[in-house]
Image (spheres, grey):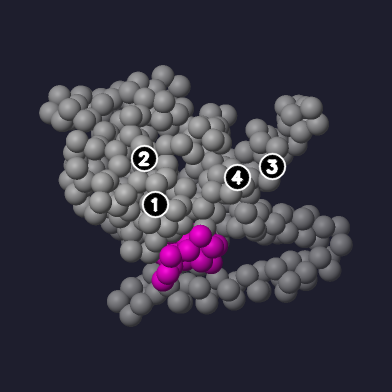
Amino acid sequence: MNSSLSSLPSVSVILPCLNENEYISACLDAIINFDYPKDQLEILVCDGISNDGTRDQILAYQNKYPYVKMIDNQKKTIPTALNLGIKSAKGDIIFRLDVHADYPKDYLKKCVTRLIEFKAENVGGIIITKPKTPSFIGNAIVAVLSSPFGVGNALFRTGSTTPKEVDTVFGGCFHRSIFNEIGLYNENLKGNQDLEFNLRLNAAGGKIMLFPDIKAIYYARSTIWAFCKNNFRNAFWAIYTLNFVKYFALKLRHLVPMVFFLSLLITSLLGIFFHPFFLVLLFVILVPYSAMNLYSSFKMTEKDCIHLFFILPFLFFTLHISHGMGSFWGLLKMIFSRQFWEYRFS
């Protein structure tokens, strides 16, 4: 942690990958083009035995660039990929990146220098979300995922004007020693592993910082079905993580959609037997929510994209309901899991 800025430390870039034929080349090109000394860099692509041509592309880069290496990830999950990379890494800095993103040339150097300069344990930046496929729906989904009404106080998505200490960041730039101190990624978690690790890091006294001038482009899902599936999966794992950890690895933003979904469900069911609950559903829940939804949708539209206003309220509602349903399913599965109760009281 006492590295000098005049002598940049060695960095191991870890890139989990599975069937990313469409994105892997562009991502590797962006990493190779980082303005960082190549004798201080290694790129570890942890591939889950892809079968779509991704491995051939990685091998081509490995043959061309001596600092690119492919590691087989037989278990195919992201935390396993990350841990395989960390165990194989030779660098003093561990740099966790995502294939579905594009990075400017100075991305790595900015992260490393800020990590050292601010004596942090993890740093990251803002993601500028773009659709995988530019379209009316794709652009609307991007707007929803960049709105505080849509994703709460996830500053790496919504943005910040000043450097801030946060609970998590996109990707991450870590001192290697951190993994010796608090352990590796939890391999039980097929989702939510980044947040869980960062909350564990924070609980151990580690400083996680977000810098608004560090930016990456992230390509979001561009169809409503893919959007819903991803929301449901992320929400499920945000809650189901508690099946594998004894501390509360959640933030308020992860619980609000589930509370909203359950309030709709419970008041609707109660209203069948006691009609005044339909008034509660309408005036206490739906009217305030609709007002906030319409206001946020209006704020997200500009003069040249006012047409998005007609789809944003639906997508906000879709985001919150799919997220709420995923959280509720995670809660149910956890409550009825014998492992949860044995682990909690062992």
The residue type indicated by label 1 comes to: Leu
**Residue position for label 3:** 247
Q: How far apart are the two marked residues, 1 and 3, measured between alpha carbons?
A: 27 Å
Point 73% across, 72% down: residue: 284
Crowd band around label 1 with a 10 angstrom C-alpha radius: few (<14), some (14–19), many (20+): many
Q: Secondary structure at mark 3?
A: loop
**In this rendering, is residue 307 above or below 26?**
below
Q: Which residue is found at the position 39% from the left and 47% from the top?
A: 2
Per the model, the C-alpha gap separating discs 2 and 4 is 19 Å
Residue labelled with disc 4? 204
**Snapshot quadrant of residue 1:** top left
Q: Which residues are magenta?
A: 142-165
Callout 4, which amino acid? Ala
Question: Gap between marks 2 and 1, in whole Å?
Answer: 9 Å
- What residue lies at 41% left-to-right and 19% top-to-bottom? 74
Determine contact: label 2, label 1, CB under 8 Å: yes
Looking at marks 1 and 3 on the same chain, the residue that comes earlier in the sequence is marked by 1
Give the labeled residue for mark 1: 115
In the rendered image, which quarter is residue 261 located in? bottom right
Q: Is residue 81 left or right of residue 331?
A: left
In-front residue for pair 85/118: 118
Mark in front: 3 vs 2:
2
Horizontal and vertical percent position of residue 300 = 43, 72
* Sequence order check, earlier mark of 3 and 2: 2
**Residue 205 in view (yes/no):** yes
Closer to the eye: label 3 or 4: 4
Q: Nearer the viewer, mark 1 or mark 3?
A: 1
